[in-house]
Amino acid sequence: MQIKIAASILAADPTEFGKELERVEKAGIDLIHIDVMDGHFVPNITMGPFIVEGLKKKSHVPLDIHLMIENPENYIGSFAEKAGKDDVITFHIEATDNPLKVIDIIKQTGLKAGVAISPDTDANSIKSLLNSIDMILVMSVYPGFAGQKFINAVCSKIETLRGAAPVGLDIGVDGGITPETISEAASAGANVFAAATSIFGKRDYSEAIKKLRQVAQDHSNPLIKN
Ligand code: DX5
Ligand code: ZN
């Protein structure tokens, strides 16, 4: 399986989103991760569909739209119309009582569906969905802010989910990813790594991405090796 590094633009320079996008693409990024926060599901407010629209016009790699919002079903349409079929919309399992309905709404737009799981939520809460989704996103920090410390305890959850997931399912990890922490997440079974600070906080994006990819590859779980 492919190791994918996603650049979370939450830590990019907001006055230069277009240029930042060009820079990370040139530096070899696989995905652009967009953190959408509503001030209800999380105590922070960030980006909406118009930012997705702007980034979509410029990007040459798929978007990974991470919805940290309540009632995600009400907003999927407005995000999806700005995005395209290779892009993923990921909602939080904690934000809905009917995840299958939300997955269905996403799939009807033609986009890929991802389910995110916060640090305190049990892996069992998404086990019944594993055959219906395109990606799992395991949060390794409490959703809301960039720059937090990686919570090691989520690695056992990644391991459980990798063991239970259909072969080839993307398992992402999001929050506190650095060249040090990525090794644990990779050996637990993640193959998609979202990072904000450890890419945009560095001077040389190419060096930063290369390093993350290298460590992830060196430590990747046998189940994700081809
Ligand atoms: C947190 C976001 C993350 C965040 C990661 O709520 O979902 O994607 O941007 O930031 P770092 O890599 O700085 O922990
Ligand atoms: Zn995120």
Image (spheres, helix red, strand yellow):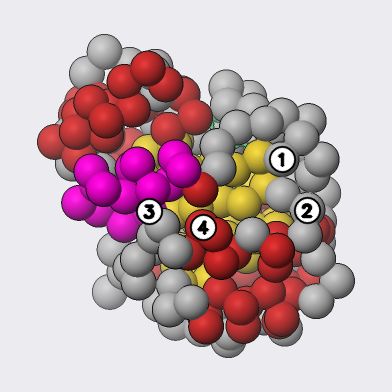
Magenta stretch bounds: 50-63
Q: CA distance from mark 1 to mark 4?
A: 14 Å
Q: Which mark is residue 194?
A: none
Tell whether label 1 touches label 2 (CB within 8 Å): yes
**Disc 1 marks which residue?**
38
195 shown above or below 159: above
Residue 220 in picture, x, y percent from top left? 38, 56
Q: Secondary structure at mark 2?
A: loop
First reached walking from the N terminus: tag 3 or tag 2: 3
Lower position in the chain sequence, tag 2 or tag 1? 1
Quadrant location, the N terminus: bottom left
Res. 55 visible in picture: yes
Callout count = 4
Location of mark 2 (residue): 70
Where residue 121 appears, as percent x and y from the top left, is 81, 56
Seen from the viewer's position, the closer of residues 89 and 189 is 89
Q: Residues within 10 Å of mark 4 (few under 14, many from 20)?
A: many
Residue 34 location (% of width, % of height)? 48, 43
Location of mark 4 (residue): 79
- Give above or below for 177 relative to 2: above
Secondary structure mostly seen in the magenta stretch? helix
Q: CA distance from mark 3 to mark 2?
A: 21 Å
Q: CA distance from mark 3 to mark 4?
A: 11 Å
Give the amino acid type for the residue marked by disc 2 in the picture: Glu
